[in-house]
Amino acid sequence: MATRADRIEVRVQPERAERIRLASQLLQSSVSAFVVDAAVEKAEQVIADHAYTTLPGKYFDRLLAALDAPPVVIPALAKAASRVRKRRAFIQR
């Protein structure tokens, strides 16, 4: 059996607590195990949702084409970048 060291406490509205108790009974699980399992499942979903970006195929194809295309120099942006480089060089002296 895994060692449990951390403790998380929550306050729950009575109606929600009753639903949690009912659900845990239906699964023949303790309330603690039910809550932990549900929280871990939700945590994994949130982490996965933020770890990956999914795009429809046509957008992915356009993205790859844009990445493969030669760079386009935008004069105003190049000028601004040059100014920033000059300022950084001056500050670093």
Image: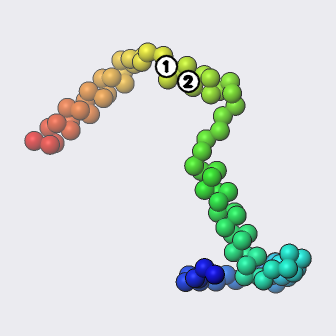
Residue beneath disc 1: 68
Does residue 24 appear in this view? yes
Whole-percent x, y for residue 13 in the image: 78, 81
- Residue at 36 percent across and 21 percent down: it is 76
> The C terminus is located in which quarter?
top left
- Residue at 68 percent across and 24 percent down: it is 58
Circle 1: element type: helix
- Residue at 86 percent across and 75 percent down: it is 27
Do labels 1 and 2 touch, CB within 8 Å? yes
Whole-percent x, y for residue 79 in the image: 30, 23
Q: Which amino acid does label 2 sit on?
A: Leu
Q: Is residue 17 above or below residue 43?
A: below
Q: Residue farthest to the front?
A: 1
Q: Residues within 10 Å of mark 2 (few under 14, many from 20)?
A: few
Q: Residues within 10 Å of mark 1 (few under 14, many from 20)?
A: few
Residue beneath disc 2: 64
- In the rendered structure, the answer to whether residue 68 lies left or right of residue 20 reads left
Q: In this view, does 52 lie above or below 82?
A: below
Quarter residue 65 falls in: top right
Does residue 23 appear in this view? no
Q: What residue type is labelled 1?
A: Asp
Circle 2: element type: helix
